[in-house]
Amino acid sequence: MDDSTDQLDRAFGALADSTRRDLVARLAVSDATVGELAEPYDVSLQAISKHVKVLEEAGLVTRSRDAQRRPVHLNAGALDSMTTWIERYRREAEERYRRLDALLSRMAEGDDERPTDQEDTP
Amino acid sequence: MDDSTDQLDRAFGALADSTRRDLVARLAVSDATVGELAEPYDVSLQAISKHVKVLEEAGLVTRSRDAQRRPVHLNAGALDSMTTWIERYRREAEERYRRLDALLSRMAEGDDERPTDQEDTP
DNA sequence: ACCGTTGTCAACCAACCGGTTGAATACGCG
DNA sequence: CGCGTATTCAACCGGTTGGTTGACAACGGT
């Protein structure tokens, strides 16, 4: 199994949790320590620490080795690789839809000119 | 808990699996039945059926009720809502980074003009 | 040198996930 | 009607996940 595949697994998995998405949203505004991040939620600090670890292993977040205070920093590059993946297939799908739509339009304005074994026809 | 939150949970969770990402990639090219989708993998048909169900519940995929054949169709709109979410925070993070970078540049070219309690300074 | 602050590690638990097999359902066709 | 094809449902299994609590490690300040 590919390495970038594994990274995508982790990245999408990391964002599949609303608490972690919330952390990402807050980290987009400013870096923060685990303690600061944990404060708004009513779960234990350890739980948030685990969440941050998941984000870190997904490459979405880095921690400046700064002694006992280790501020968490959002890594925009990892988000970028996710959108790159998604957009690739979204565009492909929309392009295909556009072509199919055009085909149907052509068929509608003249039934005689049947499409000769076109791609999108089942 | 919000409804769109739940939808994002499912959507990201759905793409957190390489088999399901592969299915999405193939569906971007053309619609397909579960049987066709299952053929390349050496897992059971039922396993792929489950994967498709996950994609469907995430809104990433729809199925035209076409009798016993129910072709699976990629829903580009759901992908769009994912990129919208990601891009929002990626842009925010990059903007913040850009501002910090500019601040550091300003500081570097003249130590006298110290920034007066700026936002990004720790 | 000690204390408080900050964060992680470890063990445990319930719930969920991806896979399996076997049975059931839903049609189209002869 | 009854068979074959296509797909889903149900029960089960082992591994992972999100949460808990308790102990411990790493520093900074006084």
Image (spheres, coloured by chain):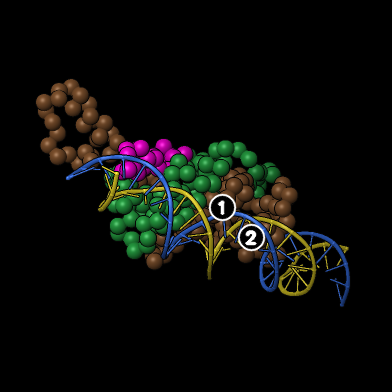
Chain colours: A brown, B green, C blue, D yellow
As shown in the figure, which amino acid type bears the numbered disc 2? Lys
- The percent coordinates of residue B45 (x first, y second) are 36, 57
**Which image quadrant is residue A64 in?**
bottom right
Magenta-span inclusion, residue B76:
yes
User: B8 or A48, which lies in front?
Assistant: B8
Task: Say which residue appears at 57% left-offset and 41% top-offset.
Answer: B5
Q: The disc numbered 1 marks a residue on which chain?
A: A
User: B46 or A112, which lies in front?
Assistant: B46
- The percent coordinates of residue A95 (x first, y second) are 29, 38
Residue numbers of the magenta segment: B60-81
Q: Is residue D11 left or right of residue D5?
A: right
Report, in whole angstroms, how far the alpha carbon at label 2 lies from the one at label 1: 16 Å
Q: Which residue is mark 1?
A: A74
- The percent coordinates of residue A34 (x first, y second) are 68, 56
Residues marked 2 and 1, same chain: yes
Task: Say which residue appears at 15% left-offset and 23% top-offset.
Answer: A110
Q: Which residue is mark 2?
A: A50
Task: Say which residue appears at 37% left-offset and 60% top-offset.
Answer: B44
User: A106 or A60, which lies in front?
Assistant: A106
User: B83 or D29, which lies in front?
Assistant: B83
Check contact, mark 2 vs mark 1: CB within 8 A. Answer: no
